[in-house]
Amino acid sequence: MTLIAGNCNAELKKIEANTIDLVYLDPPFFTQRDHILKTRDNTKEYSFEDKWSSINDYLEFIKECLAECRRVLKSTGSIFLHCDKSASHYLRVLLDEIFGSANFQSEIIWTYKRWSNSKKGLLDAHQTIYFYSKTEYFKFNTIYTNYSPTTNVDQILQTRERNGNGKSAYKLDEEGNPVIEREKKGVPLSDVWSIPYLNPKAKERAGYPTQKPVLLLERIIEIASSENDVVLDPLCGSGTTLVAAKLLNRKYIGIDISQEAINLTQKRLEELVVSRSFLLEKGEKSYLNKTDYEQKILDSIEAIPVQRNGGIDGFLKEYYLGKPVSIRIQKNDETLEEAKARLVKSSKTKDCRLMILVRTNPKRAKFFFGEESSESNILVIDSYDYLIDHWLTRKIKHYELALS
Amino acid sequence: MTLIAGNCNAELKKIEANTIDLVYLDPPFFTQRDHILKTRDNTKEYSFEDKWSSINDYLEFIKECLAECRRVLKSTGSIFLHCDKSASHYLRVLLDEIFGSANFQSEIIWTYKRWSNSKKGLLDAHQTIYFYSKTEYFKFNTIYTNYSPTTNVDQILQTRERNGNGKSAYKLDEEGNPVIEREKKGVPLSDVWSIPYLNPKAKERAGYPTQKPVLLLERIIEIASSENDVVLDPLCGSGTTLVAAKLLNRKYIGIDISQEAINLTQKRLEELVVSRSFLLEKGEKSYLNKTDYEQKILDSIEAIPVQRNGGIDGFLKEYYLGKPVSIRIQKNDETLEEAKARLVKSSKTKDCRLMILVRTNPKRAKFFFGEESSESNILVIDSYDYLIDHWLTRKIKHYELALS
DNA sequence: TCCAGAGATGAATCCACCC
DNA sequence: GGGGTGGATTCATCTCTGG
């Protein structure tokens, strides 16, 4: 919640030791160039200098910064250093020195598709993020991804054991059938991340050079911190890190030497909730009020989501009797009656002839549901989760009765 | 065409200067472990040692080797140094020293899918290959790859020119139609290579630990050498580099300290066994047979999708009565009866106590559905699309009746 | 406490077999 | 015989145990 315009190393010294959970550091890459970018409306120009008298001069600066970062980190904290091939090897030598090679966790490769150029050689399409922890007791949240399409079901479900020859084989029960035991969660996230460089629609973005995608920062913050933790970006530029931190309910501290950059960051943080450009920047997958779950239900009927309406979550793409069809998904804390009331109220001005209400839990009061309500102009359907859950409960009751 | 059993640095010294076009160097990675693997028929055991008294000891060895490699390279030649995160930063510092940082060309990232393990942190899924040239006049053959599916066709085919305002625009002929002139070749190969890891059961596997896929070596040889050029691998192991060189009509020299390794290489060169994996040829997407629609339904209940099974589309993350819950989504061309039969058949071996069938269209035959089938262990639920569609049809009939 | 060695991990892949 | 599916084998592994 703090933004500071000032010299990074000097400001870092003012921060108390052992107070930060996560540092993301995105220093100049030692490109020996100046980086300038104008905003699209040509009104502003953001720039930073990346010219150094020598590599040692550059490393001196980074070294001091890293040492301060280590000091302010909690013992469960981690640092992510973003760089590219220009100086990555020297930077990692520094990291080994300051954090210890035993605390090296990962070399994360960020890959992206890029416009080609006519350079002789291979097209550069990645940058590197070094992940070091302060101690071996660092925080880490595993993210699980889908299984490879080539993986077969048995691999996922069956248990294995060593056979007589010490080779691994499927475990069989006495009757020779394969044993199915544990629940599987998916494949742990790897150290190669393919995240689009910039959304083509994101032309309205901040205009700051070397701006990183929010998605990249979100992933870093997710795996290495918890809610309400403190995220620090000592060279915050346009403030992408802090935007991601705010979105994920982390506290944040940002430092940048340029007052322009701090102003821009301030603006991005404020506009977070309302800004149109932010939506574009984060891509189609961004949803502000919608939970993942609600979004998935809307997706499955290819509905158009609506973000800023208290009663309506989305609309069907198709009209009914020439009028839009509004949709509401019952919220966790509301009865079906309440959900219905909100949907009807908000739909009044839209002149809907049909409304769809998705029931997600059994707080239903005296309300008709399912096909029974065909007389009215509200269709109530049950979410898959609800159906499955409801059915399971009944099955288990049935099972218990049979046992008793 | 030469295979030498002997000490790498000693044997390199015997090679005349400026005679080699391409060096591929795959030294131990400084893992501080021994690497042992038995052949599949258990008849032979190949191994190499990767234990060093210190990092300096290790770097000393590599440094001498690199210096010799530079000496034997032609001025148009290049070296590819294969390593992983263990010591990549130190190795690149050496390369900068010996070849000069101006001759750094690329940091190639080889990524692959891998068997996961239970480590805390991200799953390692890449290795690094440093590409340095001896001079700026190095040989390089650009390989062109396919355009991204999101690339606009017009951008691929049409010609552009500066318009009156100095902005780039599509070139038009006198009648105002876009001009199609040059043949576009595709997107230049990037520095991130996704190549499947050699399968444990692949015929190509020789039983040598750390064996590399032939495709990886083929790509390196293709971009940095021409036919009849001389390829050198001073630590050739099982000889993958030489196999690739022979396949691409290059001359080759291989050195390894182990006579066993040289014998194996000899045998592989005679037999030239290469497994052309299905995955490589057809691409991963050929396995992906889930439609967007089906995926969205699975997503909305947070199910784990399954790709390679005729009857099952996915599983719930949670087990029921200690057993997995299988899911099938009714396909467009099948009745609910057929869908049920396939789901039941495939679920039999998985010991499922509960199956979920998602009805997506009304071809239902004489089959019970919904809560009516609660006696059995199949839960049939209707897709949202089906529910909405069904309801609308009834409403419209009702409306038409009222009008007539 | 440290190190070596045994044991456990768990999905990716191509193979082989089965209808 | 050809498409699909269960199986075998691996880890420049990872973790735990015992001396």
Image (cartoon, coloured by chain):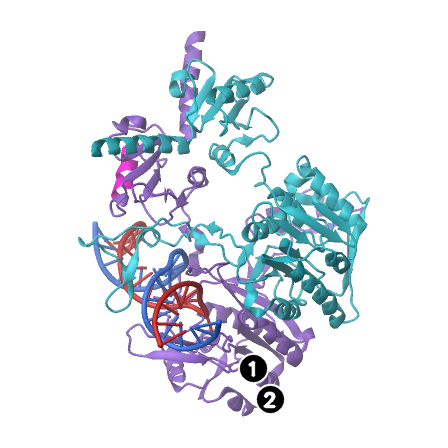
Chain colours: A cyan, B purple, C blue, D red
Question: What amino acid type is highlighted by mark number 1?
Answer: Ile
Disc 1 designates what residue? B62
Label 2, residues with CA under 10 Å away: few <14, some 14-19, many ≥20: some
Q: Is disc 2 placed on a helix, strand or loop?
A: loop
Query: In the shown orientation, is residue A213 left or right of residue B378?
Result: right
Q: The C terminus of chain B lies in which quarter of the figure?
A: top left
Residue B342 magenta-highlighted: yes
Q: Is residue B71 above or below residue B319?
A: below
Query: In the shown orientation, is residue B117 left or right of residue B69?
Result: left
Residue B287 magenta-highlighted: no
**Residue sitting at 54 percent across and 20 percent down?**
A342
- Protein chain holding label 2: B
Label 1, residues with CA under 10 Å away: few <14, some 14-19, many ≥20: some
Same subunit under labels 1 and 2? yes
> Which residue is at the front of the view, B359 or B37?
B37
Magenta residues span B337-345
| Residue extending farthest bottom | B14
